[in-house]
Structures are given as C-alpha cells and as structure tokens.
Image: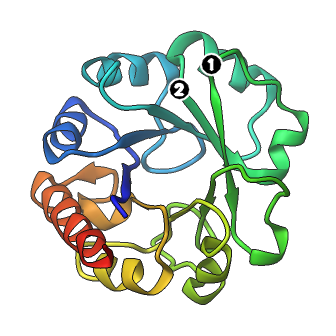
Amino acid sequence: MVGFIKLCGMTDEGAVEAALEAGADAIGFVFAPSVRQVEPAFAARIAAPARGRVPCVAVTLHPSRDQLAAIFADFGPDVLQTDAEDFASIVLPAGVKALPVVRDATRVPPGGVRILFEGPKSGTGQVADWTAAQRVAASREVVLAGGLNPDNVAEAIAQVRPFGVDVSSGVEAAPGRKSPARIADFVIRARAAYARLT
C-alpha cells in the first residue's frame, strides 16, 4: 500500500514549494470561508509550479453557481472537493474529477468513487470518526482527513488503513500559514506508516 498524501489549504508560494519538495501527491486550495480562503486567480498564480506535477484540488463547501464558474474559469482545478450532496447539482467540466466529502459513514454515496472522510467541520482540526472511516475504507478508496498532524498520522493510517490522508491545520505554524518543517515531518511519517502496512 503506497499511500496518497494530500496537503490542503495552500495560501502562498512557500507552502506550495514545501508541499512539492516534501513529495505530496496532491495539493488543495480552499475557496470556502476560512482563514485559508483564497481567490481563484490568486490560487492559479501560486499553483503554477505544481501544474503537471500533482493534481490541484479546489476545496469548496456548498458553492454557488457563480463561485464555481469563477473557480473553473480562473483556477482550472484538476479535482473539485465538496460535500457529497453538492454534486447532485454540479456539472463538472471535462477532465475535472470529483472528490466527495463525507462526514458520516451512513451518508456515503453509492458507487466506487473515491471519497474524502472528514471530521465534523472542515478546517477546524476536529478528528474524524476513525472507526467509521475504517469500515468505509474496507470496501472503497478513502482519503482520511480531519485533525491529522505529524504526531497522529501513523496511528490513523495503522487503524483506518485508508487509501490516503489529507492534512491542513496540522502542518501550520499559525492559522493559514504552513510550516515547511511540519509538512516534511508529516509526509515522512505518513510514508513510513504506509510502508509498514505492506
């Protein structure tokens, strides 16, 4: 099990550079209300070094039609991440993949699509229900998010055995500001934990 690592909440060029240097498999940009929220055109600018190297994920929460239009036009995401129920009314442009967010094992969308299993409220550092996530991860690809950090990621991977992990606040020096050292530490520990699974 190789393990997929997504680093979320990029707010400046330094964070993107640190994520790429650490070997992230995807990076996320938040367009929902948050200390990490960025505008689509700004996100496009700081994401430029990552294009063609790793998928760039647009992270939203119940986005409006106008907001989505701006994100698709100005940012051009590879992946759209939002709550699973939002996708019922979203038409994705060609080439853009969906990453539905689930916070409750009873609300997992049907089909085999990869999902992100999140804590009760995104971006707050609240830990997801690992027991529920483990049940879901037994039958489909789950990216585990919610309250992960360098200190608990190995335990989370060992218990849940997810397809991947996603971190944002857990690798910050201050709210909205990533720590290159914590990013590197998180990736190293996550990779080591996945290596132990194999």
Residue at 60%, 89% in the rendered image = 131
Residue at 81%, 53% in the rendered image = 111
Q: Which of 12/164 is in front?
A: 164
The answer to whether the residues at label 2 and label 1 have Cβ atoms under 8 Å apart is yes
The location of residue 35, given as percent across then percent down, is: 44, 50
Q: Which of 35/132 is in front?
A: 132
In which quarter of the view is residue 87 placed? Answer: top right
Q: Nearer the viewer, mark 2 or mark 1?
A: 1
Name the amino acid type tagged 2: Asp
In which quarter of the view is residue 31 placed? Answer: top right
Q: Which of 58/134 is in front?
A: 134
Q: Is residue 136 left or right of residue 42?
A: right
**In the rendered image, which quarter contains the N terminus?**
bottom left
Secondary element at tag 1: loop
Q: Is residue 161 left or right of residue 88?
A: left
Q: Is residue 84 left or right of residue 29?
A: right
Name the amino acid type tagged 1: Gly
Question: How many numbered markers are drawn?
Answer: 2
- Asked if 88 appears above or below 175 in the picture, the reply is above
Secondary element at tag 2: loop
Q: Quick one: which residue is furthest to the right in this view?
A: 89
- Asked if 92 appears above or below 117 in the picture, the reply is above
Q: Residues within 10 Å of mark 1 (few under 14, many from 20)?
A: few
Q: Which of 113/24 is in front?
A: 113
The location of residue 124, given as percent across then percent down, is: 50, 68
Residue at 16%, 63% in the rendered image = 188
**In the rendered image, which quarter contains the C terminus?**
bottom left
Q: Which residue is mark 1?
A: 95
Q: Give the number of the disc on residue 78.
A: 2
